[in-house]
Image (tube, rainbow, N blue to C red):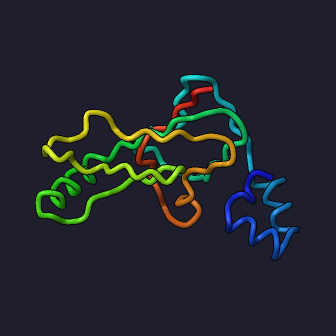
Amino acid sequence: PTIVAHQFFNDLRSENLRVVTRLCHEAIQPISSQGDETLFHTGDACTSMLFVERGDLTYIFRMHKQFRKKQEANSDSGGPSVEIISPRNRRRPSNPSASGDPPDEPPEVPISHGMWLSEAALWTVWEHCGELVAES
């Protein structure tokens, strides 16, 4: 199954195949989408982890206004900045450019088969920090 690409679920399967089988039959629901459909928006409540079985999607990182203000304050004071790490290990800084201007476009990350999103929903109360758009 698609979920065993994630280390936690793979380890769980090794320890207790019955639990993973029950998860697949009772707790996992498919979601279908069409091209150019937005599956979630920044600030939407996130109540489930998503696994991609097929198709291509794009995750567009957009910070909440409250977080953006904190990010800008940290940047001005030389504090920490946020980095988006794409699935292909390319780092994409979300802090202002070297000129001090905010980036023109938010970072976009291609999402495809075998990848997952919104893992935080399993462990904590979470809100989406971007938009997920179906490409195909």
Q: Position of residue 39 (x, y in %)?
A: 55, 35
Q: Position of residue 47 (x, y in %)?
A: 56, 53
Q: Classify residue 20 by image quadrant.
A: bottom right
**Residue at figure coordinates x 21%, y 45% from the top left:** 97
**In the foreground, 118 or 94:** 94
**Residue at figure coordinates x 61%, y 50% from the top left:** 116
Q: As drawn, is 128 to the left or to the right of 117?
A: left
**In the foreground, 28 or 16:** 16
**In the foreground, 106 or 49:** 106
Q: As drawn, is 111 to the left or to the right of 114?
A: left
Q: As drawn, is 88 to the left or to the right of 106?
A: right
Q: Position of residue 82 (x, y in %)?
A: 32, 57
**Residue at figure coordinates x 64%, y 29% from the top left:** 33
Q: Quadrant of the C terminus?
A: top right
Give the tally of numbered discs: 0
Q: Classify residue 30 by image quadrant.
A: top right
Residue placed furthest toward the bottom? 15
**In the foreground, 3 or 120:** 3
**Residue at figure coordinates x 47%, y 57% from the top left:** 126
Relative to 57, say whether 115 is above or below: below
Q: Position of residue 108 (x, y in %)?
A: 43, 38
Residue placed furthest toward the top? 35
Relative to 55, say whether 65 is above or below: below
